[in-house]
Amino acid sequence: AQRVTQPEKLLSVFKGAPVELKCNYSYSGSPELFWYVQYSRQRLQLLLRHISRESIKGFTADLNKGETSFHLKKPFAQEEDSAMYYCALNYGGSQGNLIFGKGTKLSVKP
Amino acid sequence: EAGVTQSPTHLIKTRGQQATLRCSPISGHTSVYWYQQALGLGLQFLLWYDEGEERNRGNFPPRFSGRQFPNYSSELNVNALELEDSALYLCASSPTGRTEAFFGQGTRLTVV
Protein backbone atom coordinates (compact mmCIF):
# COMPACT_ATOMS: atom_id res chain seq x y z
CA ALA A 1 0.00 0.00 0.00
CA GLN A 2 1.08 3.56 -0.62
CA ARG A 3 2.45 5.31 2.40
CA VAL A 4 4.35 8.46 3.35
CA THR A 5 6.47 8.45 6.47
CA GLN A 6 7.88 11.48 8.22
CA PRO A 7 9.84 10.03 11.13
CA GLU A 8 10.26 13.25 13.10
CA LYS A 9 7.28 14.91 14.75
CA LEU A 10 9.41 17.82 15.88
CA LEU A 11 12.70 19.19 14.65
CA SER A 12 14.37 22.01 16.52
CA VAL A 13 17.41 23.86 15.17
CA PHE A 14 19.16 27.17 15.73
CA LYS A 15 19.06 30.00 13.24
CA GLY A 16 21.76 29.56 10.61
CA ALA A 17 22.04 25.81 11.11
CA PRO A 18 21.32 23.37 8.27
CA VAL A 19 17.92 21.71 8.20
CA GLU A 20 16.85 18.36 6.82
CA LEU A 21 13.28 17.15 7.14
CA LYS A 22 13.00 13.50 6.28
CA CYS A 23 10.37 11.90 4.10
CA ASN A 24 10.19 8.30 2.94
CA TYR A 25 7.53 6.87 0.72
CA SER A 26 6.23 3.48 -0.23
CA TYR A 27 5.00 3.13 -3.81
CA SER A 28 5.98 0.71 -6.52
CA GLY A 29 5.20 2.97 -9.45
CA SER A 30 6.49 6.39 -10.53
CA PRO A 31 5.69 8.78 -7.71
CA GLU A 32 5.05 12.48 -7.79
CA LEU A 33 6.17 14.04 -4.55
CA PHE A 34 5.47 17.35 -2.90
CA TRP A 35 6.29 19.32 0.18
CA TYR A 36 3.51 21.41 1.69
CA VAL A 37 4.01 23.94 4.48
CA GLN A 38 1.64 25.45 7.01
CA TYR A 39 2.79 28.58 8.82
CA SER A 40 1.09 29.60 12.04
CA ARG A 41 -2.53 30.68 11.42
CA GLN A 42 -2.16 30.24 7.67
CA ARG A 43 -3.53 27.67 5.31
CA LEU A 44 -1.63 24.71 3.98
CA GLN A 45 0.28 25.68 0.85
CA LEU A 46 2.51 24.02 -1.67
CA LEU A 47 6.21 24.60 -1.06
CA LEU A 48 7.75 22.60 -3.87
CA ARG A 49 7.33 19.53 -6.06
CA HIS A 50 10.00 17.14 -7.23
CA ILE A 51 9.25 17.50 -10.95
CA SER A 52 10.04 21.20 -10.81
CA ARG A 53 13.49 20.68 -9.36
CA GLU A 54 13.36 24.22 -8.03
CA SER A 55 14.46 25.97 -4.88
CA ILE A 56 11.76 27.80 -2.94
CA LYS A 57 12.67 30.01 0.02
CA GLY A 58 16.07 28.33 0.00
CA PHE A 59 14.57 24.84 0.34
CA THR A 60 15.38 22.01 -2.04
CA ALA A 61 14.32 18.39 -2.18
CA ASP A 62 15.67 15.60 -4.33
CA LEU A 63 13.81 12.45 -5.15
CA ASN A 64 15.92 9.38 -4.42
CA LYS A 65 14.12 6.43 -5.92
CA GLY A 66 16.71 3.96 -4.64
CA GLU A 67 16.13 5.02 -1.06
CA THR A 68 12.47 5.97 -1.70
CA SER A 69 13.13 9.29 -0.04
CA PHE A 70 12.30 12.93 -0.69
CA HIS A 71 14.05 14.82 2.07
CA LEU A 72 13.66 18.59 2.36
CA LYS A 73 16.83 20.55 2.94
CA LYS A 74 17.94 24.09 3.62
CA PRO A 75 21.56 25.05 4.31
CA PHE A 76 20.83 27.93 6.69
CA ALA A 77 17.57 27.94 8.64
CA GLN A 78 15.75 31.20 9.35
CA GLU A 79 13.28 31.90 12.16
CA GLU A 80 10.53 32.46 9.61
CA ASP A 81 10.95 28.86 8.47
CA SER A 82 9.26 27.69 11.67
CA ALA A 83 6.14 25.84 10.53
CA MET A 84 4.55 22.44 9.98
CA TYR A 85 5.91 20.64 6.95
CA TYR A 86 4.04 17.84 5.20
CA CYS A 87 5.42 15.50 2.61
CA ALA A 88 2.85 14.26 0.10
CA LEU A 89 2.75 11.53 -2.53
CA ASN A 90 0.59 11.66 -5.62
CA TYR A 91 0.10 8.28 -7.20
CA GLY A 92 -2.05 7.24 -10.11
CA GLY A 93 -1.71 10.53 -11.96
CA SER A 94 -4.52 12.42 -10.27
CA GLN A 95 -4.66 14.69 -7.28
CA GLY A 96 -7.38 12.58 -5.79
CA ASN A 97 -4.69 10.11 -4.92
CA LEU A 98 -2.63 12.58 -2.91
CA ILE A 99 -1.64 11.19 0.46
CA PHE A 100 0.20 13.01 3.20
CA GLY A 101 2.66 12.18 5.91
CA LYS A 102 1.82 13.14 9.47
CA GLY A 103 4.00 16.20 9.31
CA THR A 104 7.10 17.55 11.01
CA LYS A 105 7.02 20.67 13.11
CA LEU A 106 10.14 22.72 12.46
CA SER A 107 11.16 25.15 15.17
CA VAL A 108 14.01 27.53 14.40
CA LYS A 109 15.40 29.17 17.51
CA PRO A 110 17.18 32.53 17.49
CA GLU B 1 -7.69 36.18 -6.72
CA ALA B 2 -9.91 34.75 -3.99
CA GLY B 3 -8.65 31.52 -2.48
CA VAL B 4 -10.55 28.43 -1.49
CA THR B 5 -13.20 29.36 1.04
CA GLN B 6 -14.81 27.05 3.55
CA SER B 7 -17.80 27.55 5.81
CA PRO B 8 -18.49 27.51 8.62
CA THR B 9 -15.18 28.06 10.35
CA HIS B 10 -16.32 26.20 13.42
CA LEU B 11 -19.16 23.75 13.90
CA ILE B 12 -20.32 22.09 17.08
CA LYS B 13 -22.69 19.15 16.86
CA THR B 14 -23.93 16.46 19.20
CA ARG B 15 -23.37 12.79 18.63
CA GLY B 16 -25.85 11.31 16.17
CA GLN B 17 -26.55 14.59 14.38
CA GLN B 18 -25.62 15.47 10.82
CA ALA B 19 -23.03 18.03 9.78
CA THR B 20 -22.79 19.87 6.47
CA LEU B 21 -19.57 21.56 5.47
CA ARG B 22 -19.21 23.79 2.44
CA CYS B 23 -16.37 24.65 0.10
CA SER B 24 -16.00 27.15 -2.71
CA PRO B 25 -13.05 26.46 -4.99
CA ILE B 26 -10.86 29.00 -6.71
CA SER B 27 -12.56 30.37 -9.80
CA GLY B 28 -11.79 28.15 -12.77
CA HIS B 29 -10.91 25.12 -10.67
CA THR B 30 -13.08 22.11 -11.40
CA SER B 31 -11.66 19.62 -8.90
CA VAL B 32 -12.43 19.67 -5.19
CA TYR B 33 -10.86 17.44 -2.57
CA TRP B 34 -11.80 16.86 1.05
CA TYR B 35 -9.39 15.82 3.77
CA GLN B 36 -9.83 15.07 7.45
CA GLN B 37 -7.09 16.23 9.80
CA ALA B 38 -7.63 14.55 13.13
CA LEU B 39 -5.26 15.08 16.01
CA GLY B 40 -2.16 12.93 15.60
CA LEU B 41 -3.35 11.34 12.35
CA GLY B 42 -2.22 13.81 9.73
CA LEU B 43 -4.30 14.52 6.65
CA GLN B 44 -6.54 11.65 5.59
CA PHE B 45 -7.99 11.76 2.07
CA LEU B 46 -11.80 11.68 2.10
CA LEU B 47 -13.27 12.49 -1.30
CA TRP B 48 -12.42 13.89 -4.71
CA TYR B 49 -14.94 15.53 -7.02
CA ASP B 50 -14.30 16.68 -10.54
CA GLU B 51 -16.79 18.11 -13.01
CA GLY B 52 -19.65 17.22 -10.71
CA GLU B 53 -18.73 13.57 -10.32
CA GLU B 54 -17.21 11.68 -7.40
CA ARG B 55 -13.88 10.42 -8.79
CA ASN B 56 -12.29 8.80 -5.79
CA ARG B 57 -13.00 8.03 -2.18
CA GLY B 58 -10.78 7.41 0.80
CA ASN B 59 -11.15 4.73 3.43
CA PHE B 60 -14.10 6.26 5.27
CA PRO B 61 -17.56 4.84 6.04
CA PRO B 62 -20.55 5.67 3.80
CA ARG B 63 -21.90 8.16 6.33
CA PHE B 64 -19.27 10.49 4.90
CA SER B 65 -20.67 11.73 1.63
CA GLY B 66 -20.76 14.81 -0.48
CA ARG B 67 -21.54 16.37 -3.77
CA GLN B 68 -20.29 18.94 -6.22
CA PHE B 69 -22.59 21.54 -7.69
CA PRO B 70 -22.63 22.91 -11.26
CA ASN B 71 -20.64 25.93 -10.09
CA TYR B 72 -18.01 23.47 -8.74
CA SER B 73 -18.64 24.31 -5.11
CA SER B 74 -18.94 21.30 -2.87
CA GLU B 75 -20.60 20.02 0.27
CA LEU B 76 -19.35 17.39 2.65
CA ASN B 77 -22.03 15.67 4.72
CA VAL B 78 -21.31 13.58 7.76
CA ASN B 79 -24.26 11.62 9.08
CA ALA B 80 -24.71 9.95 12.46
CA LEU B 81 -21.84 11.91 13.95
CA GLU B 82 -19.49 10.13 16.28
CA LEU B 83 -17.11 11.67 18.79
CA GLU B 84 -14.12 10.58 16.73
CA ASP B 85 -15.36 12.64 13.79
CA SER B 86 -14.10 15.70 15.65
CA ALA B 87 -11.37 17.09 13.41
CA LEU B 88 -10.33 19.84 11.06
CA TYR B 89 -11.85 19.26 7.63
CA LEU B 90 -9.85 20.74 4.79
CA CYS B 91 -11.03 21.41 1.29
CA ALA B 92 -8.65 21.90 -1.63
CA SER B 93 -9.16 22.68 -5.29
CA SER B 94 -7.18 22.40 -8.48
CA PRO B 95 -7.76 22.81 -12.20
CA THR B 96 -8.65 19.59 -13.99
CA GLY B 97 -5.57 17.55 -14.80
CA ARG B 98 -3.27 19.63 -12.63
CA THR B 99 -1.64 18.18 -9.57
CA GLU B 100 -1.15 21.27 -7.42
CA ALA B 101 -3.81 21.62 -4.73
CA PHE B 102 -4.82 24.90 -3.11
CA PHE B 103 -6.23 24.54 0.38
CA GLY B 104 -8.87 26.39 2.34
CA GLN B 105 -8.59 27.35 5.98
CA GLY B 106 -10.69 24.44 7.09
CA THR B 107 -13.79 23.81 9.17
CA ARG B 108 -13.23 22.73 12.75
CA LEU B 109 -15.93 20.18 13.59
CA THR B 110 -16.43 19.32 17.23
CA VAL B 111 -18.77 16.49 18.18
CA VAL B 112 -19.92 16.47 21.80
Image: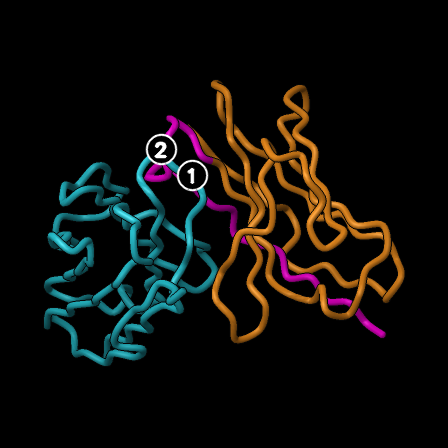
- Please give the residue where the numbered disc 2 appears in the rendered image: A94
Residue most extreme to the right: A16
- Please give the residue where the numbered disc 1 appears in the rendered image: B99
Q: Residues within 10 Å of mark 2 (few under 14, many from 20)?
A: some
Q: Position of residue B75 (x, y in %)?
A: 17, 60
Left or right: A49, with A98 as reference point: right
Residue at 70 percent of width and 33 percent of height:
A62
Which color has been applied to chain B in this rendered view?
Answer: cyan
Which kind of residue does numbered mark 1 sit on?
A: Thr
Check whether the beta carbons of the residues at disc 2 and disc 1 lie within 8 A of each other. Answer: yes
Left or right: B25, with A110 as reference point: left
Q: How many marks?
A: 2
Magenta span has A96?
A: yes
Q: Position of residue A30 (x, y in %)?
A: 50, 20
Residue at 62 percent of width and 56 percent of height:
A104
The disc numbered 1 marks a residue on which chain?
B
Q: Residues within 10 Å of mark 1 (few under 14, many from 20)?
A: some
Which element carries disc 2, helix, strand or loop? Answer: loop
Image: magenta residue range: A90-110
